[in-house]
């Protein structure tokens, strides 16, 4: 069987997600609700005065606020160069830990792309590789965080991981909940932007081929 193209994946995610995406509604994401809706749904989001977000919450706010020190967030990891992105002792249950980790990975991918930080892109790749070896996608809370990050790994292991994330978010009700729907839409946007960037690279003058 031929593996779906990136274009086909993006279109598939949109077909699943767009009918279930409630516009700008509160999505039940706790402390992540405001930065997620601001970054993904286009809603107004203002960080509360004096708030000092940490972990994945800080990375999501960083998509809206260049004043967030992303490097400081990443430096809190057990190994700043590889392995998980967040300190393990911030969370108790494995489901909460994996959900936070994949949420952080999702946000960091966007930050690396938009701020043109090759070092953050490398960190995304090392974290993705660690999760492929060490975590099961069904250990999370059935939200498809970082699905695009795995798909863009473009190997069978990454594709299987992404497919499991998608399956899990549909398992209970056949369609995603509103938060998962917006996560899928953001993943589709990421795939589309990555594909567009690759096409632009191929068209640059002086490139072989």
Image (cartoon, grey):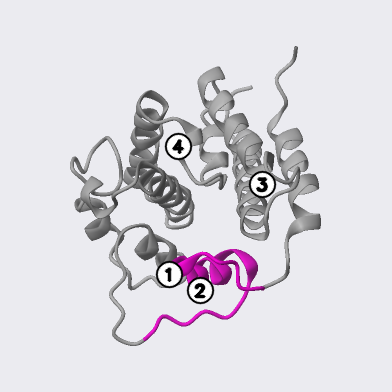
Tell whether position 193 is magenta: no
| Mark pair 2, 3: CA separation | 21 Å
Residue labelled with disc 4? 139
The secondary structure type at the circle numbered 1 is helix
Upstream in sequence: badge 1 or badge 4: 1
| Residue drawn where x is 23% and y is 49% of the image | 87
| Mark pair 3, 4: CA separation | 23 Å
| Residue drawn where x is 39% and y is 40% of the image | 124
| Mark pair 4, 2: CA separation | 25 Å
The image shows residue 20 at horizontal and vertical percentages of 76, 57
Q: Is 90 located above or below residue 39 in the figure?
A: above
Report the mark closest to the observer, 4 or 2: 4
Residue placed furthest toward the top: 1
Upstream in sequence: badge 3 or badge 4: 4
Q: Is 80 located above or below residue 161 in the figure?
A: below
Residue labelled with disc 2? 34
Report the mark closest to the observer, 3 or 1: 1
| Mark pair 1, 2: CA separation | 7 Å
Q: For this rendering, which residue is in front, 137 or 182?
A: 137
The image shows residue 78 at horizontal and vertical percentages of 18, 43
The image shows residue 209 at horizontal and vertical percentages of 64, 22
Query: Which quadrant, please, contains the N terminus?
Result: top right
Residue labelled with disc 3? 188
Q: Is 23 located above or below residue 93 in the figure?
A: below
Q: Can residue 204 be seen in this view?
A: no
Residue labelled with disc 1? 31
Tag 1–tag 4 contact (CB < 8 Å):
no
Range of magenta residues: 25-48
Which of the 4 quarters of the picture holds residue 70?
Answer: bottom left
| Mark pair 3, 1: CA separation | 24 Å
């Amino acid at each position: 069987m031929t593996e779906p193209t990136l274009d086909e994946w993006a279109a598939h995610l949109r077909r699943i997600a767009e009918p279930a995406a409630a516009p700008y509604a509160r999505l039940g994401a706790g402390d992540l609700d405001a930065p997620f809706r601001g970054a993904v749904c286009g809603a107004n989001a203002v960080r509360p005065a004096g708030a000092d977000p940490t972990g994945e919450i800080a990375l999501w706010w960083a998509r809206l606020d260049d004043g967030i020190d992303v490097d400081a967030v990443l430096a809190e990891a057990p190994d700043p160069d590889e392995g998980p992105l967040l300190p393990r002792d911030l969370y108790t249950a494995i489901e909460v830990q994996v959900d936070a980790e994949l949420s952080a990975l999702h946000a960091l991918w966007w930050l690396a792309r938009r701020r043109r930080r090759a070092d953050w892109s490398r960190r995304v790749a090392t974290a993705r590789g660690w999760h492929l070896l060490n975590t099961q996608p069904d250990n999370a809370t059935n939200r498809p965080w970082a699905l695009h990050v795995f798909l863009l790994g473009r190997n069978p292991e990454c594709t299987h991981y992404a497919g499991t994330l998608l399956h899990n978010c549909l398992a209970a009700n056949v369609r995603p909940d509103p938060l998962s729907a917006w996560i899928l839409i953001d993943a589709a946007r990421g795939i589309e932007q990555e594909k567009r960037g690759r096409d632009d690279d191929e068209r640059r003058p002086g490139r072989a081929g």
